[in-house]
Image (cartoon, rainbow, N blue to C red):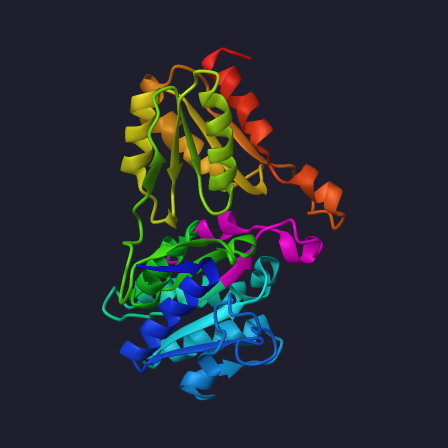
Amino acid sequence: MAVLSFGQALRDALDVAMSEDERVFIAGEGVGVSIHYDPNLPTHGLLEKYGPKRVKDTPVSEAAIAGLAVGASTLGLRPVVEIMFFPFITLATDMLVNHAGKLRYLSGGKSSFPLTVRVKAGVNFAAGCQHSHNLEAWLAHSPGLKVVFPSTPAEAKGLLLSAIFDPNPVVVVEEMLLYWMQGEVPDGDYRIPIGKARVVIPGKDCTIVSYGGAVYTALEAAKTLSGEGISLEVVDLRSLVPLDRRCLLDSVSRTGRLVVLHDATKFGGFGAEISAIVAEEAFDMLKAPVKRVAAPDIPVPVSPPQEIFYKPSSEMIIEAVRSTVGKA
């Protein structure tokens, strides 16, 4: 295994896919020359290796980028397009929701429409609310789209490669603050099945379910609470659609308690779906009500101190867990 940053792992996945299949190409704003000057950014150096026919800088139009992806996929190519910031995906949703997500259904499953959308997410880089709003729940609510949200360099590579070679449209959400995180990454064509969660650390008193960078906030809370004799089981969903319901329900059956964590706003967030599944299918296993820890229902502030307030903290998780296990 090589030790790569999260961004380098994404680049490795793109490189493997492009070398294996000439139908794979990359498109997006600045993916070739103007933006990815840092070797930890995902498309660094790919223009020089594969040329402008397969690494295409686009106009500043998310609708056009998504339309390019849909059209290319209908012609048998495997486009991998980048939406620079998560809120900008709203400009691409007509093509993604009304076309990409529905074409395979309309064909009766007889045709494949493989396309991958990479989108940058996260807060705490002082870019303002137009660049920082996490919208994974919007996408998860749209039938026909798969949504994955890796938290480690190995997951970044494995899930991106699975997305590229999936016959359905897949949105890969990349947390920007993780781009420089280092970790061991398997060599070659390494894939993680879409729809499989993982238990990061086992525990017996309460389950924490999360994804993306929020997993590390959960781990920080788990470390603190272990000193108080409270054992947390941390589950990294990795894939939101399809969702690994079995892993979720098995964990709750072991601990009897659940706290759901995400950096997106709380109302209508993906945590509500997790909570509802457990309430519907595992209510008799619960020893206490489900708790949700999420961002406040406001636009993301641009001020760094206010951003810190906005992002759910380990202290918030600790408080939720203490109240759940009766040690508040």
Question: In the image, is residue 142 part of the stretch drawn in magenta?
Answer: yes
Identify the residue at horizontal 51%, vertical 11% (top origin).
Answer: 327
Residue lying farthest to the left in this orientation: 110
Q: In which quarter of the image is the C terminus?
A: top right
* Spot occupied by residue 310 in the image (x, y as percentages of width and height): 67, 40
Identify the residue at horizontal 48%, vertical 68% (top origin).
Answer: 42
Q: Is residue 65 shown left or right of residue 9?
A: right
Stretch of the chain drawn in magenta:
119-145
Q: How many labels does the image show?
A: 0
Question: In the image, is residue 9 part of the stretch drawn in magenta?
Answer: no
Quarter of the image where one finds residue 245: top left
Nearer to the camera, 154 or 175: 154
* Spot occupied by residue 237 in the image (x, y as percentages of width and height): 38, 43
Nearer to the camera, 174 or 244: 174
Nearer to the camera, 52 or 228: 228
Identify the residue at horizontal 32%, vertical 17% (top origin).
Answer: 284
Q: In which quarter of the image is the N terminus?
A: bottom left
* Spot occupied by residue 263 in the image (x, y as percentages of width and height): 56, 42
Looking at the image, residue 51 lies above or below residue 61: below
* Spot occupied by residue 288 in the image (x, y as percentages of width and height): 43, 16
Quarter of the image where one finds residue 296: top right
Looking at the image, residue 303 lies above or below residue 271: below
Q: Is residue 253 shown left or right of residue 309?
A: left
Q: Is residue 220 shown left or right of residue 101?
A: right
Quarter of the image where one finds residue 229: top left
